[in-house]
């Protein structure tokens, strides 16, 4: 029996009989790379034997070939080298397995990633063909995969078959088969060509993001975002559905638009990472139900007609080429499951990314965009609904509304004594307009300073040059023309306030309803999406966007949908969890629900600092 | 207990409790149509109740709807109607199930077909969507398929998903899902749109045939043949391989050529049958290994280099669209397995079609084309080899050689006394050239009449205007210029005889070798392929194409490969059998085998009627 010390972990282990260094490292649970799992194929498990009580056995032929001059520096292959006497072994940086790396994004509210991708590299040595017992190239490769990894019934994608003959004869000893779900060979490469990549898409009505990830390390290689080209056909999902109803080729135009956009993101992300797109072997996508349908080429028209059924709810695994997506020719796109016509896979992905289904704290999750998707619950029960919030949270339908782009007013302060305004813009540029978090901030301050009254009307008794009658009635000047990029005054109008009232009241009512159904107050609020992330929680409370529960924390969680897409890309178990989320979440249809109408109407008011005369009906 | 008599089968059965007419018919094993298997969906099980001892229960709502005025004529649905008293029931012609139909082709040497196709129609009623328990269209369809047929884990092809929303709302109560292997939905149609079709391809180096079959009846709807457009790149497989080696886009040109040809055959066969190509839900293909590889886009170059390994041997199921084959968008192409570089799936299909693997009689199977594939064996053991016979059997490399087309000399008689010739042509047109069976017949007669001597040289002592010296040495005139379409004499040259000698000797040697390995004489010879089918067995023996075993029958079996392709299309169990054939057949490589060389050289001679002077080496 001998004792082996491993640097840099400073762990020791007693040997039991003749064991290889790899076996010892595995017994200790050390992250020593071994792509082939100790089958003496990959040559990745390089270690340095720093000290030994007895001389080591001579290097094997494979070690000599694989390590070359590294042998002089004490390098050995851990799978080939047996230790029988005390020794000190170092696992060098390049041999540290990335499998254990935990992807934790900035904040603690997101669940960490375990790396369990669907596609795994399997390096193998394939026998040469012989004359008198003829076996096809595919059959010899299959035999090697069976003998080396015990992979039984493997299917080869037809495009992979085409790569076999040249690759087996390209001079390398080892070829690497990329096997999906232990079932299908979807790529074949020379060993030296490196690992597999994947791309996770988050397809928003407005913005599309692609996260290129290294499937062997879990690391993000690059991230690219683009405007959804479908915005040319209308800003919201309803206008996209209308195109499909009214134009014979409407669906096809929207479909090819989004596919082209995803292909650009793939190309750009790969260019940034300095690699070819055909190394991207897997993709995932989340989006609202209409985005999901358009990508799949499914007619979304019935989503606009009661009872608003989607064409499908379940997750789909589709050959990327069947949708026109240009990643590796045999790669798959996994579309996460969705719940209902207006609760899409983006919402499911938010729940996945925030760990709501495992939470012990009753939590309210808001994903605010054109529609406000709301989830409430904990590990025992999840409820969800969708409110037609309108586009105010994305700056839509406002006099000076804009997307959250440079120059957008995103935060406002109003001095209650002087009604003077200080407006903060994105990238500190001269203001161009007002984005979602900006209008929330502005109206919250206008309520606090008494400019906006309970019903949303303006306090006409206040005296300030900023408060005035404009073409469309009363308005309040956030920025004077001289300081703006537009060279005109940027104002918040009475109509803008009404838009926000409709939106916030819908969200407030939906959240209140789910809380009533759940039967207990939420103790945490997660705000997903760009608007939610940049919004000041106090503003959200000030305008009455969220029901007020004493002690409830409000946390911005950023692009949780995109993070959920990444999770599903890197960890196939998360795909199963997404399906469980989609199935178990209880969907509440709000259409025609009288309790929702009550809550909606009562939620329209502001808790104004002071009320004045002229406070009529908010919607006359 | 009551007694029920069924016309027109004149079978009676005692009822056991309350049983439906369908249950009674099924107990008797009567071929009563019931597409939905008694699940009260399809409305196919119409019967006429001709007499009853007691009045029948009133027709159900579904019967009234489904049968309409037929009710007045005694029609009922067998699945809906329970008999409790004596009755006489007639199964009308239109309700006779076609499932039992046995496809027997002309001769008894081919195995009959049992109809067990891979694709089955499943008519179902799908529930309407409801507001407060939202289910996607796909999910409701899936539920209907599970509840009606017990189909559990079904996958939907993405192109089928696109058909769902409109089809569920097209007004029909019933939709029919076409399910492949009980696993994947590959088409969806209105019930009234009828059944599924399939097409079986036989891809020859020269000729390609497509058999369009009705998968619900097993009937042939139409057959179309075309010239393989790859012939423009060379007549034989070796020239096709050369193109792939020498031209950068050679493989792609050959691949798209054959795919285009198959698409034309689909289009023509469907036009002839008066139907759309998208109703063809399944295809099968057989061909030699090079044809198989070219269709799949697999580089065949290594087939020309020892040890001649194919890229693959196993059967493949490929989405037809992935190869560019234009049948139904979600249909599959099944490519039968192959054995070796020069024993393709066409040979496997011949073995399948002739039932060789189940035969108790040791049998020799010859498939003569550019290569002569030879199989010898019985149920206990099958041996195979391939001989590079050269193109003589297809009329290639002969001075006046041609394919078996109208005007080709296919049969020759020579009067041994006068050496006068009577030549029979295809379609009795003026002769244009000589096809494979024609050259065999001509040389056999020339041997019989002493014109050709043992070593293949011409008997220069004979005096006849037909026997003369031409530009290329001695030649024999089969047809005088005045009677031909060419307006020139059609002759058989010494060189033509040499070509035939090489070909027949290769086949003879291969067959002899397999017989030696098998250890017992064959007692039956099956000649597959056009040439084999039209050849006179006595001619085959006369030229020494086949080793002579006393009492062995020689039978032409026509396009056995094509029949094998049809078998695999109509009966998925035959696909399994084809895989067993391909695996269990023992392949004998002839290259470098000294015993083969011996047999080859000794088989070169003719058993000439009389020998004369000048009989030198056959190949000087």
Image (tube, coloured by chain):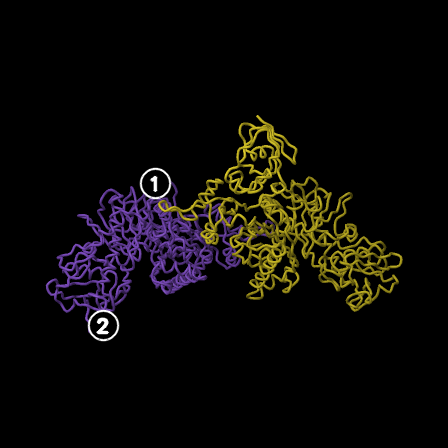
Chain colours: A purple, B yellow
Question: Residue A352, image x and y in percent?
Answer: 32, 49
In the picture, residue B70 is in which quadrant? top right
Residue that mark 1 sits on: A1
Question: Of A196 and A359, which appears nearest the observer?
Answer: A359
Quadrant position of the C terminus of chain B in the picture: bottom right
Residue located farthest toward the top when viewing the structure as drawn: B1
Q: Chain of mark 1?
A: A
* In this rendering, position of residue B515 left or right of residue A323: right
Q: Is residue B562 visible?
A: yes
Question: Of A387 and B596, which appears nearest the observer?
Answer: A387
* In this rendering, position of residue B584 left or right of residue A510: right
Q: Is residue A61 visible?
A: no
Secondary structure beneath dot 1 equals loop
Question: Residue A216, image x and y in percent?
Answer: 37, 54
Q: How many marks?
A: 2
Dot 2 alpha-carbon crowd within 10 angstroms: few under 14, some 14 to 19, many 20 or more: few
Disc with the residue nearer the chain's start (2 vs 1):
1
Question: Residue A468, image x and y in percent?
Answer: 17, 68
- Residue A48 bears which disc, if any? none
- Residue A488 bears which disc, if any? 2
In the picture, residue A198 is in which quadrant? bottom left
* Separation of residues labelled 2 and 1 (CA atoms): 85 Å
């Amino acid at each position: 029996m001998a004792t082996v010390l491993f640097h840099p972990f400073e762990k020791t282990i007693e040997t039991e009989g003749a064991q290889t260094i790899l076996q010892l490292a595995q017994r200790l649970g050390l992250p020593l790379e071994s792509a082939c799992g100790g089958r003496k194929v990959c040559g990745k498990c390089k270690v340095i034997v720093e000290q030994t009580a007895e001389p080591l056995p001579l290097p094997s032929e494979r070690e000599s070939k694989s390590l070359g001059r590294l042998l002089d520096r004490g390098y050995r292959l851990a799978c080939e080298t047996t230790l029988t006497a005390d020794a000190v072994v170092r696992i060098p940086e390049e041999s540290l397995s990335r499998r254990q790396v935990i992807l934790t994004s900035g904040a603690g509210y997101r669940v960490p990633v375990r790396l369990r991708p669907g596609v795994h590299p399997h390096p193998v040595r394939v026998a040469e063909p012989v004359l008198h017992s003829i076996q096809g190239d595919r059959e010899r490769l299959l035999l090697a995969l069976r003998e080396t990894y015990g992979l039984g019934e493997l299917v080869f994608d037809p495009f992979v078959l085409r790569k076999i003959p040249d690759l087996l004869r390209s001079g390398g000893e080892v070829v690497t088969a990329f096997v999906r779900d232990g079932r299908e060979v979807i790529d074949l490469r020379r060993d030296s060509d490196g690992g597999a990549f994947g791309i996770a898409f988050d397809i928003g009505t407005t913005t599309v993001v692609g996260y290129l990830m290294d499937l062997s390390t879990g690391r993000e290689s690059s991230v690219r975002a683009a405007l959804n080209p479908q915005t040319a056909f209308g800003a919201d999902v309803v206008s996209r559905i209308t195109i499909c109803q009214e134009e014979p080729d409407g669906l096809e135009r929207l479909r090819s638009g989004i596919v082209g956009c995803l292909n650009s993101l793939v190309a750009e992300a790969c260019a940034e990472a300095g690699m070819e797109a055909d190394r991207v072997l897997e993709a995932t996508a989340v989006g609202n139900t209409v985005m999901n349908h358009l990508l799949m080429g499914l007619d979304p028209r019935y989503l606009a007609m009661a009872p608003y059924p989607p064409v499908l709810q379940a997750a789909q695994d589709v050959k990327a080429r069947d949708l026109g997506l240009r990643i590796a020719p045999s790669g798959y796109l996994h579309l996460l499951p969705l719940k209902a016509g207006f609760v899409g896979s983006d919402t499911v992905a938010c729940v996945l990314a925030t760990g709501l289904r495992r939470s012990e704290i009753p939590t309210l999750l808001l994903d605010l965009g054109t529609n406000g998707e709301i989830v409430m619950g904990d590990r025992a029960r999840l409820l969800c609904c969708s409110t037609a919030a309108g586009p105010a949270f994305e700056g839509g339908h406002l006099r000076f509304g804009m997307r959250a782009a440079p120059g957008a007013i995103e935060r406002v302060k109003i001095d209650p004594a002087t009604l003077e305004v200080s407006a903060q813009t994105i990238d500190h540029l001269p203001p161009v307009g007002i984005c979602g978090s900006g209008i929330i901030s502005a109206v919250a301050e206008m309520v606090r300073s008494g400019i906006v009254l309970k019903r949303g009307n303006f306090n006409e008794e206040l005296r300030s040059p900023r408060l005035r009658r404009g073409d469309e009635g009363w308005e309040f000047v956030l920025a004077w023309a001289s300081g703006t990029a537009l060279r005109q005054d940027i104002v918040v109008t009475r109509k803008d306030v009404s838009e926000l009232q409709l939106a916030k009241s819908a969200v407030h009512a939906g959240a209140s309803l789910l809380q009533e159904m759940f039967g207990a107050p939420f103790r945490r609020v997660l705000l997903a999406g760009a608007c939610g992330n940049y919004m000041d929680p106090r503003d959200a409370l000030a305008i009455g966007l969220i029901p007020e529960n004493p002690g409830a924390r409000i946390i911005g969680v950023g692009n949780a949908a995109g993070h959920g897409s990444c999770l599903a890309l890197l960890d196939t178990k998360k795909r199963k969890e997404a399906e469980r989320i989609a199935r178990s979440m209880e969907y509440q249809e709000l259409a025609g629900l009288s309790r929702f109408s009550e809550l909606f109407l009562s939620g329209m008011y502001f808790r104004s600092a002071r009320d004045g005369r002229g406070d009529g009906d908010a919607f006359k």
